[in-house]
Image: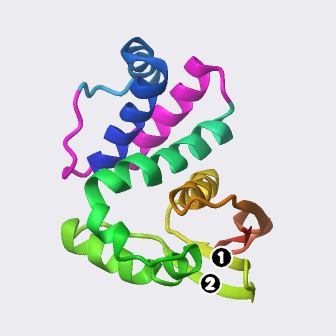
């Protein structure tokens, strides 16, 4: 993953728990990097080691850490680094979900070696849809759950999301029901 991801984890921790907790998480994780370069590619294991260490140090479930990180990514990191891209994603949550492929295509211009996830949307009703999340990376289902919740906050609406089925069921994707 690009260093921007690890920098965002650091931002989440330092903003909400302080610099001292981040130092403890770095130590607990065994990650030998004091600073991450946003445009440099790091082994995915580093990111997962940081999340697991954060879970231990902050006494939170790994699921809760990943959900919090997903929300932070949308509300802080994406706004800061991709603000204009986020603004062109749509005027409504539904439009944003529909335009996710275009969003990721534009992000690929910034990060040419990125392997972004893919999303497929199925409309259910005016305020409900199914979102299929495809990724070569496993273990990020809760992060996507947090992204969805964060997008709800970004659009100033309350969102409910539930994992319907997914990799845990032997599928090559995770499918969420999203209501607002």
Tell me whether the residue at label 2 lies in contact with that at label 1, contact meaning CB atoms closer than 8 angstroms: yes
Q: Residue at x 37, y 67 (%)?
A: 86
Name the element at disc 2.
strand
Residue 58 % position (x, y): 58, 20
Q: Quadrant of residue 15?
A: top left
For the magenta stretch, what is the residue range? 35-60
Q: Residue at x 69, y 58 (%)?
A: 158
Q: Residue at x 51, y 35 (%)?
A: 51
Is residue 180 visible in the rendered image? The answer is yes
Q: Earlier in the sequence, mark 2 or mark 1?
A: 2
The foreground one among 52 and 20 is 20
Q: Quadrant of residue 126?
A: bottom right
Measured Cα–Cα span from mark 2 to mark 1: 5 Å
Indicate whether residue 45 is drawn in magenta.
Answer: yes
Is residue 1 visible in the rendered image? The answer is no
Residue 157 % position (x, y): 64, 61
Residue count near mark 1 (Cα–Cα under 10 Å), binned few <14, some 14–19, many ≥20: many
Instruction: Please tell me whether residue 35 is drawn above or below residue 105 in the rendered image.
Output: above
The colour mode here is rainbow
Indicate whether residue 120 is drawn in magenta.
Answer: no
Query: What is the quadrant of the C terminus in the image?
Result: bottom right
Q: Which residue is mark 2?
A: 121
Name the element at disc 1.
strand
Q: Which residue is mark 1?
A: 131
Total labels drawn: 2
The foreground one among 13 and 27 is 13
Residue count near mark 2 (Cα–Cα under 10 Å), binned few <14, some 14–19, many ≥20: some
Q: Quadrant of residue 31?
A: top left
Instruction: Please tell me whether residue 26 is drawn above or below residue 65 in the rendered image.
Output: above
């Amino acid at each position: 993953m690009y260093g921007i991801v690890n920098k965002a984890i650091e931002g989440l921790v330092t903003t909400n728990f302080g610099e001292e907790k981040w130092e403890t998480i770095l130590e607990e994780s065994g990650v030998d990097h004091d600073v991450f370069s946003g445009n440099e590619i790091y082994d995915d294991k580093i990111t997962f080691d940081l999340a697991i260490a954060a879970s231990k140090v902050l006494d939170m479930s790994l699921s809760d850490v990943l959900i919090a990180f997903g929300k932070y990514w949308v509300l802080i990191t994406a706004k800061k680094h991709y603000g204009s891209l986020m603004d062109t994603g749509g005027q409504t949550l539904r439009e944003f979900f529909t335009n996710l492929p275009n969003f990721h295509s534009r992000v690929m211009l910034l990060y040419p070696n990125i392997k972004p996830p893919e999303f497929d949307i199925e409309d259910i009703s005016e305020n409900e849809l199914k979102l299929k999340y495809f990724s070569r990376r496993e273990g990020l289902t809760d992060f996507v759950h947090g992204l969805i919740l964060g997008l709800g906050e970004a659009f100033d609406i309350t969102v409910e999301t539930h994992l319907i089925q997914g990799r845990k069921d032997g599928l090559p994707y995770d499918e969420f029901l999203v209501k607002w």
